[in-house]
Image (cartoon, coloured by chain):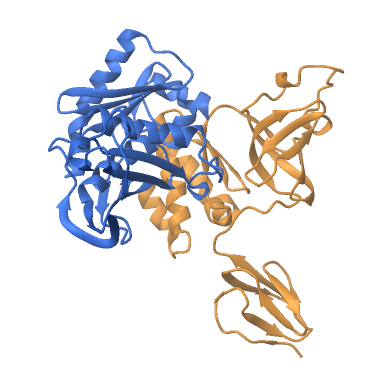
Amino acid sequence: MGTIITKDRIVIPGQVIAEGMDYLPAKGTFREGESIIATVLGLLRIEGRLINVVPLRGPYLPKAGDVVIGTIEEIGFGGWQVDIGIAYPANLSMKEATKEFIERGADLARYYNFNDIIFATITNVIRLKAVDLSMNGQGLRKLPPGRLIDVDPTKIPRIIGKQGSMISMIKEKTKCQIVVGQNGKAWIKGETAEDELKADQAIRKIEAEGHNEGLTEHMEKFLE
Amino acid sequence: MKEYLLGLIKDKKRMDGRGLSTYREPITIETGISKKAEGSARVKIGNTEVNVGVKMELGTPYPDSPDEGTIIVTAELIPLSNPNFESGPPGIQATELARIVDRGIRESHYLDFKKLCVKKGEKIWMVLIDIYSINDEGNLFDAAALGAIAALRDAKVPVIKDDKVQYGELTAKKLPLDKEAPILMTIHKLGDEFIVDPISAEEEAVSARLSIAIKGDRICAMQKGGADGLSLPEVEKAIDLAYTQVEELKKALK
């Protein structure tokens, strides 16, 4: 029989969360002998038999299926290298970059040039050094020049909200186009610089106060 | 990001909503932050933070100026303060930062070198000014220069006993400083406009910059940086802009 040891909602690294083989260690935890131990400072989530710890803050760790915003860092012979905010550049191969036919020896800068901002999905993660991107998917595209801001990747779910409610509210109130990547980058484009600034501030506010209750009402008031 | 900023500047707008010639708020200066140093200061402009320390050493004077003390400014750009900074010996950026701060103090004669002489031709005070970037969110130059002035003002001369400095024991004597302090302002050319106090993103899009040190109503040092050239009318425009900002920074120093 497994038992949950801790009564805390927030756990610290090294804290024993559960004993016994009935529970399974998921994200932010590991098993040692019979016990499941936290590896990060974060909120404890128990879903059935799975034990998760959602970190309060931290770097972005890429995983397959994530949609991310990146900037083109280098153009090679067979594709592009993209900065997605991790230690090593991610690879965008010619095959995954566009549906168009690219002729042998064509100038790849015509498709994506240096410093272009792209919205892409991660197809494969072997190591941190080998992350593959793809441009095939709904809404994935090259983004025009806009305000690119960095936010804490762990706060991204808060910024998006339940079924995208929070982000749609910001978009509606500020009349801005906003694209949020799971790697903690957000791209904003509005009609005026003031609108963009407002959207920027709103996102920063959620980042800072995301853990508070009644965030939606609070944000609504802020955006008025 | 660069394209976006250049688009904004065409409408005379900046990313954080500031005016072209507005410094970030607040500018705070805190002195006496280090117990080991003879003088120290912490300067914050917005989220940019710089620590400056002053140490004093006895040394021999240069042969061409036997009755003058000297200053040595070094800057260390700590890797934690900006993802682009690497550890190791000082690079171009750190050297330039130190030289600009050095020149502003040296050429304004803010510190009286003659009074730093202990014994002519034999012993002088060497004032070491060390700059550490704690957080770089743009405009390290102005922050470092303000910090150097504040740290010099904070410094007290240590006790000398048997020709040796007794570190940790300070006399009540302050450094021989002028009343008027030199103020360093770096004017950046972004697109066709001139701005002050850029944030990191703006610094990457800047084509040229001009650091101007002003003491009283006199310019005492200038240094140009960046790849682009500046025409004479542009230099004059930059100088005019600098003069409008002097009082702002002086207020912070008080």
Question: Residue B124: where, in percent of width, then height?
Answer: 26, 43
Compare residues A168 and B11 and report the one nearer the observer: B11
How far across and down, in percent of the image, does residue B228 sit? 46, 16
Give residue A73's position: percent from left, percent from top: 66, 32
Q: Residue at x 29, y 38 (%)?
A: B70
Q: Is residue B114 visible?
A: yes
- Residue situated in front as seen by the camera: A72 or B185: B185
Q: Which chain is orange?
A: A
Q: Is residue A164 shown above or below B106?
A: below
Q: Residue furthest bottom?
A: A1
- Residue A130's image quarter? top right
List the single residue furthest toward the right. A104
| Residue sticking out furthest to the top | B232
Left or right of B22, for residue A146: right
Residue at 30 percent across and 19 percent down: it is B238
On screen, residue B176 above or below A142: below
Q: How many marks?
A: 0
Work out which quarter of the rendered image holds the N terminus of chain A and state it. Answer: bottom right
- Is A180 situated above or below B226? below
Q: Is residue B224 above or below residue B71?
A: above
User: Residue A43 is drawn in which quadrant?
Assistant: bottom right
Question: In the shown orientation, is residue B191 left or right of residue A123?
Answer: left
Q: Is residue B16 visible?
A: no
Q: Quadrant of the C terminus of chain A?
A: top left
Q: Looking at the image, which is closer to me, A78 or A9?
A: A78
Q: Colour of chain B?
A: blue
> Residue visible at 37% across and 47% down?
B49
Where residue A136 appears, x then y in whole percent? 77, 36
Q: Is residue A35 left or right of residue A176?
A: right
Residue A48 occupies quadrant: bottom right
